[in-house]
């Protein structure tokens, strides 16, 4: 092997070694893909209203000629799962029930209107046409026969949805109605769809 | 004899030069293949969300603070929200924030200010899990605005990089004792 050949061989060998070491270095540029911290959280179904534990009405000495009792309550869906909400009562029958007319509407109202006022209420629909409280208590006793309503034209309640329910209550012009008491509580129940 | 030694010396020099040339070529190839450094820092992302409860309406429910690529050098992320007492009573309101992951509990700091600019909370995200100590009194039918800031203090280590957290703000209300 002459000098030029050895020189060439040395250069090539050295270059190859260097490049090979370079390739080893290139191999340090690796790529990975990961799926870190996979989480699963269950949804929630919860509902609340703005009464802060207070009654909607507590009136005495009502007459058939007295102005109707009109009260509004705002119901807010605070869960995360799409839900259905139904209104019913589990209150036992009371003496005035047959002589009290009740109407329930759903609608909207300015946020600044506080419980149990109805200032600015805009009705979207009458969800319980005028009937006696006795009939309401008989017909709406639980989830199965509860009064179903959704905000606007929606078909589900979604997180942070609100709906205002307006109750109109009037004593009938019936002699037998005098001196009696009517008592009712309402329950809104949400179940996920 | 002398000529043979000279030839060996020359060969050795040639090998050394060849080796150095090879190394230079390899270094050049490596240098050319080097991935350039990124232009920005990898920071932390935070979002805070708020939702109404029965007693309180929220003006714009949803995300009320968003901070992206937060680093110790970046400005705080700012936000706020407005609530309204829709009961018929004045309410005492306490607040807290629940992160969906503890990864930034120490690195991220939060400040919450009340309607009059008063400081209701200032501390780490982890400590924000507890209800604020001093309540804010809300009057029925009156909107009240709260301010939020989130930042990474300068002395925080690199553990925040690339982390994301969502904080759900919570409300606890009680009636003002009459």
Image: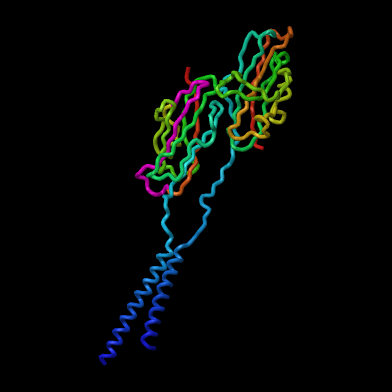
Quadrant in which residue B60 is drawn: top right
In the displayed orientation, state which residue is furthest to the left: B2
Quadrant in which residue A42 is drawn: top right
Q: What is the x, y in percent for residue B38?
A: 42, 54
Could you tell me which residue is drawn at 52 percent across and 55 percent down? Answer: A34
Name the image quarter holding the N terminus of chain A.
bottom left
Q: What is the x, y in percent for residue A73?
A: 61, 22
Could you tell me which residue is drawn at 42 percent across and 37 percent down? Answer: B110
- Residue A52 visible? The answer is no
Q: Taking B12 as reference, is B110 left or right?
A: right
Q: Magenta residues, as a range? A: B135-160
Based on the picture, tell me whether residue B159 belongs to the magenta stretch.
yes
Q: Nearer the viewer, residue A163 or A9?
A: A9
Name the image quarter holding the C terminus of chain A.
top right
- Residue B134 visible? The answer is yes
Q: Nearer the viewer, residue A39 or A15?
A: A15
């Amino acid at each position: 092997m002459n000098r030029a050949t050895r020189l060439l061989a040395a250069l090539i060998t050295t270059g190859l070694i260097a490049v090979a070491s370079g390739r080893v270095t290139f191999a340090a540029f690796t790529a990975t893909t990961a799926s870190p911290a996979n989480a699963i959280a269950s949804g929630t179904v919860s509902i609340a209203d703005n009464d802060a534990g207070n009654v909607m009405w507590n009136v005495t000495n009502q007459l058939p000629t007295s102005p109707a009792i009109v009260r509004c309550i705002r119901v807010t869906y605070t869960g995360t799962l799409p839900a259905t909400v139904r209104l019913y009562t589990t209150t036992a029958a009371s003496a005035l029930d047959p002589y009290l007319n009740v109407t329930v509407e759903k609608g909207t109202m300015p946020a600044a209107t506080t419980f149990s006022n109805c200032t600015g209420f805009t009705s979207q629909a009458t969800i319980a046409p005028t009937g006696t409280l006795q009939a309401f208590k008989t017909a709406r006793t639980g989830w199965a026969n509860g009064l179903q309503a959704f905000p606007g034209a929606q078909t589900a309640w979604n997180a942070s949805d609100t709906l205002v329910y307006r109750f109109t209550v009037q004593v009938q012009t019936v002699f037998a109605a005098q001196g009696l008491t009517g008592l009712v509580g309402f329950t809104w129940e949400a179940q996920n769809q | 004899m002398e000529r043979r030694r000279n030839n060996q010396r020359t060969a050795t020099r040639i090998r050394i030069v060849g080796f150095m040339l090879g190394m230079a070529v390899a270094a050049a190839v490596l240098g050319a293949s080097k991935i350039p450094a990124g232009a920005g820092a990898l920071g932390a992302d935070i979002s805070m969300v708020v939702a109404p409860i029965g007693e309180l309406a929220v003006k714009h429910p949803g995300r009320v603070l968003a901070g992206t690529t937060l680093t110790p050098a970046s400005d705080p992320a700012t936000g706020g929200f407005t609530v309204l007492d829709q009961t018929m009573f004045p309410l005492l309101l306490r607040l807290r924030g629940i992160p969906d992951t503890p990864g930034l509990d120490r690195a991220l700091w939060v400040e919450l200010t009340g309607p009059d600019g008063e400081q209701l909370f200032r501390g780490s995200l982890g400590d924000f899990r507890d209800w604020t100590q001093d309540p804010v009194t809300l009057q029925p039918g009156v909107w009240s605005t709260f301010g939020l800031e989130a930042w990474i203090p300068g002395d925080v280590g690199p553990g925040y990089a690339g982390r994301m957290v969502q904080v759900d703000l919570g409300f606890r209300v009680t009636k003002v004792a009459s």
